[in-house]
Image (spheres, rainbow, N blue to C red):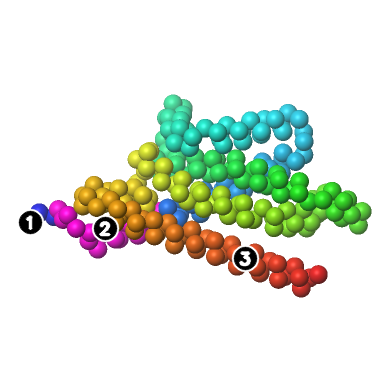
Amino acid sequence: MNSFSPVFTQGDFILMLKGAGITFYLTLVSGLFGTILGFLIGWARTVKFAPLYYLLGLYIEVFRTVPLIIQFVLFNSGLAIFGLRIDPFTSGLISLSIYISAYVAEVVRSGIESVPPVTVKAARGLGMTYLQSFRFIVVPVGARSVLPAWTGLMLGLMKDTSLVAVLGATPPELLRASQIIITRIQEPLAILIGAGAFYFIMCHFITVVVNRYEKSWNEKTKVAA
């Protein structure tokens, strides 16, 4: 019996569901590592140590201006040239982390520099060390101002995960899974609408979580005040 079927099946839905899970996983992991790396870079840029400032500035400009698909290919090819064997999925995950870190770095830098200098001076005047004032004053105040921008970056990152497919990564993420189904049943409109619904649900989930966290944060701040 021929297993080929020109209609959407339960197996196709499961394939898309698994693809959505891979997309969400790529977003969370690369977003986490990219945020950590971007935070460190953004913080280092506020120190204004000239050589480091311009070097990190070059890093940011390179990874923000070179198209992500080119970064994927160059990174994967560079690993092969140096004899490093990493599977395409992991290679794509690392590339995404580095890519998003460049954007996070600028968001972090702007957030840190948005804190009024007089506030920092007041904290230092109360006997706080640089690290204490940074941890208890600069980070909480700055993070609140950059949270919406950071959320936007994570939502954009989720859509960028579809480019991992150019490396032949397996298992397939959501868009690649959708393309596989489209090739078989030739119903692109219906399948892409379904894929869009999955992207909407995942993005909405992230937005709701961040908004609830921000609301809880504001309420705690009011109580403390």
Q: Residues within 10 Å of mark 3 (few under 14, many from 20)?
A: few
187 sits to left or right of 78: left
Q: Is residue 3 visible?
A: yes
Q: Residues within 10 Å of mark 1 (few under 14, many from 20)?
A: few
Marks 1 and 3 sit apart, C-alpha to C-alpha, by 54 Å
184 sits to left or right of 106: left
Location of mark 2 (residue)? 12
Tag of residue 75: none
Q: Nearer the viewer, residue 144 or 27?
A: 144
Judge depth for marks 1 and 2 and give the one in front: 2
Task: Kindly give the residue lying farthest to the bottom in the view shown.
Answer: 223
Judge depth for marks 1 and 3 and give the one in front: 3
The main secondary structure of the magenta stretch is helix
Identify residue type, mark 3.
Tyr
Identify residue type, mark 1.
Met
65 sits to left or right of 215: left
Q: Quadrant of the N terminus?
A: bottom left
204 sits to left or right of 131: left
- Residue displayed at 66% across by 33% down: 57
Image location of residue 58, percent across then percent down? 63, 30
Task: Kindly give the residue lying farthest to the front in the view shown.
Answer: 189
Q: Which residues make up the magenta segment?
A: 4-22
Location of mark 1 (residue)? 1
Q: Residues within 10 Å of mark 2 (few under 14, many from 20)?
A: some
Task: Kindly give the residue lying farthest to the top in the view shown.
Answer: 81
Location of mark 3 (residue)? 213
Marks 1 and 2 sit apart, C-alpha to C-alpha, by 19 Å
Image location of residue 186, percent across then percent down? 22, 50
Earlier in the chain: of badge 1 and badge 3, it is 1
Q: Check disc 2 and report its element: helix, strand or loop.
A: helix
Whether residue 13 is in magenta: the answer is yes
